[in-house]
């Protein structure tokens, strides 16, 4: 059952407690901290703002929206095509691992705990591996959750996970992490609004240091995170 307005399932599915293993990934942030590119409130906020405006968070939200629309109309061939593109877009082995591990775990957990038959076609279309934003888009559409709220919740969850990583990397403290999230809320809202009306033609990015960080992290000597 959903409540009027925000659906509580979004709070559960995009919560840090949901078992997708998001805590194990830093999206290259660990290397950025090692290099001194991210070292305080200002540099963390700038780094994440670029991901929202020009990087993976923006692209993931576009992929989520396109998947949501294709699932809503039962176009499983289109869903599979979007998933193949989402996997191909990953710039490094660790980023591929990051999206596939979370995507597979997300779909599997929702099917196990909220099993009502609505995800049978989704699981068939996305076998064997699914990118995380595609899993979220397909699942929320199959369960009738609204796209706008899903995009907003997804973006906030992505930023929250990376600020949590920054805390564990000692780049910022807990209060500055919350300051970062507060500062990025308008950016996230704008990104969600844009993604809702975007298509795959709008995909693209210009956050090269983030991509380089994800590549360099593969050989980083001391690591807390898997990406």
Image (cartoon, helix red, strand yellow):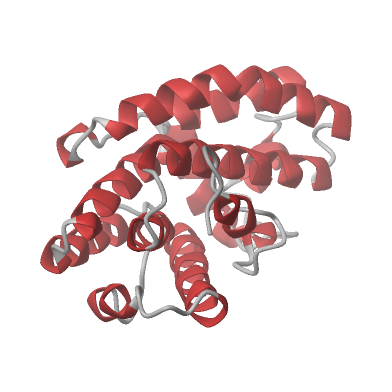
- In the rendered image, which quarter is residue 124 located in? bottom left
- Check the image and report above or below for 5 versus 138: above
Q: Position of residue 133 (x, y in %)?
A: 40, 54
Q: Nearer the viewer, residue 8 or 103?
A: 8
Q: Position of residue 140 (x, y in %)?
A: 41, 57
Q: Position of residue 135 (x, y in %)?
A: 39, 63
Q: Position of residue 100 (x, y in %)?
A: 44, 68
- In the rendered image, which quarter is residue 93 located in? bottom left
- Quadrant where the C terminus sits is bottom right
The residue located at (13%, 62%) in the rendering is 75
The residue located at (37%, 52%) in the rendering is 91
Image check: 115 left or right of 20?
A: left
Does the rendering let one see residue 40? no
Image check: 48 left or right of 134?
A: right
The residue located at (23%, 32%) in the rendering is 198
- Check the image and report above or below for 18 versus 182: below
Image check: 26 left or right of 155?
A: right
Does the rendering let one see residue 63? yes
Q: Nearer the viewer, residue 32 or 220?
A: 32
Image check: 226 left or right of 61?
A: right
- Check the image and report above or below for 91 versus 24: above
The residue located at (29%, 72%) in the rendering is 122
Numbered circles on residues, count: 0
């Amino acid at each position: 059952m959903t409540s009027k307005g925000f659906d509580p399932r979004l709070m559960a599915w995009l919560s840090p407690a949901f078992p997708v293993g998001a805590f194990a990934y830093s999206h290259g942030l660990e290397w950025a901290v090692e290099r001194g590119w991210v070292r305080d409130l200002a540099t963390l906020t700038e780094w994440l703002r670029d991901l929202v405006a020009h990087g993976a968070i923006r692209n993931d939200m576009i992929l989520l929206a396109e998947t949501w629309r294709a699932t809503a109309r039962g176009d499983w061939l289109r869903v599979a095509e979007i998933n193949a593109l989402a996997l191909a877009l990953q710039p490094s082995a660790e980023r591929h691992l990051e999206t596939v591990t979370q995507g597979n775990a997300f779909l599997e957990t929702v099917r196990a705990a909220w099993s009502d038959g609505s995800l049978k076609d989704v699981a068939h279309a996305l076998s064997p591996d699914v990118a995380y934003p595609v899993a979220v888009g397909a699942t929320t559409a199959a369960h009738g959750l609204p796209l706008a709220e899903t995009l907003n919740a997804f973006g906030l969850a992505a930023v929250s996970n990376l600020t949590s990583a920054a805390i564990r990397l000692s780049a910022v403290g807990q209060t500055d992490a919350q300051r970062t999230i507060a500062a990025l809320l308008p950016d996230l809202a704008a990104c969600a609004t844009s993604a809702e009306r975007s298509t795959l033609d709008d995909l693209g990015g210009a956050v090269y240091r983030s991509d380089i960080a994800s590549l360099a992290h593969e050989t980083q000597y001391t690591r807390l995170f898997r990406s």
